Amino acid sequence: MRILIDTNVILDIVQKREPFFADSYQALRKAIEADAECLISASAATDIFYMLRKAFQSAQKAKERIEQLSQIVTFADVQGVDIHTALMRSMPDFEDAVVDTVAKRSGASYILTRNIKDFAGSCVPAITPTEFLKKEQKTACGRHRLFICVCHMQFFIFYLLI
């Protein structure tokens, strides 16, 4: 699974913005634990750097955070065709249309964002960190039930062979 993570979720985590930090952090953590490929658009990296530099009053600290971020996410290139495609979308926010276009071209299953309303009409479904956590919890429960079923089936087969 691939998930494109919107700028606001990354900033929630890096800047520990309340009340959003916990769910944003947990959603990213769960995605990584589930072996999802976490993407951010390459253009988001410059936006994140700008916001961090302002927040930290230090370009060096902002660079360090971007470097740390690069250890856990893949930067998805923004191509010229993405800009042209986004311009044709009927989405209210151009930047979000670019994110959606990159997410679609990259094969993302979801866009993880707190700003779902701006992704109305997007090709890739937008999901909040809170919704993602609920979905992952159900999936994890399903995996647990499947594991129990497999164990019971193995026991049943073993019992038949005796």
Image: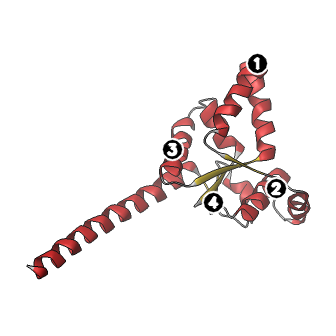
- Residue that carries the numbered disc 1 in the rendered image: 58
Disc 4: CA contacts within 10 A as few (<14), some (14-19) or many (>=20): many
Measured in 3D between alpha carbons, the distance from the residue under mark 4 to the one under mark 1, in whole angstroms, is 33 Å
- Of labels 2 and 1, earlier in sequence is 1
Measured in 3D between alpha carbons, the distance from the residue under mark 2 to the one under mark 1, in whole angstroms, is 28 Å
Residue 96 % position (x, y): 78, 53
Quick check: 98 left or right of 145? Answer: right
- Residue that carries the numbered disc 3 in the rendered image: 29
- Of labels 1 and 3, earlier in sequence is 3
In this rendering, the answer to whether 38 lies above or below 123 is above
- Residue that carries the numbered disc 2 in the rendered image: 98
Please name the amino acid that badge 3 sits on: Arg
The C terminus - image quarter = bottom left
Secondary structure beneath dot 3 equals: helix
- Residue that carries the numbered disc 4 in the rendered image: 110
Look at 67% across and 50% down and name the residue there: 39
Front disc: 2 or 1: 1
Please name the amino acid that badge 1 sits on: Ser
Please name the amino acid that badge 2 sits on: Val
Front disc: 3 or 4: 3
Disc 2: CA contacts within 10 A as few (<14), some (14-19) or many (>=20): many
Say if mark 3 contacts mark 4, CB within 8 Å.
no
Please name the amino acid that badge 4 sits on: Tyr
Look at 37% across and 65% down and name the residue there: 142
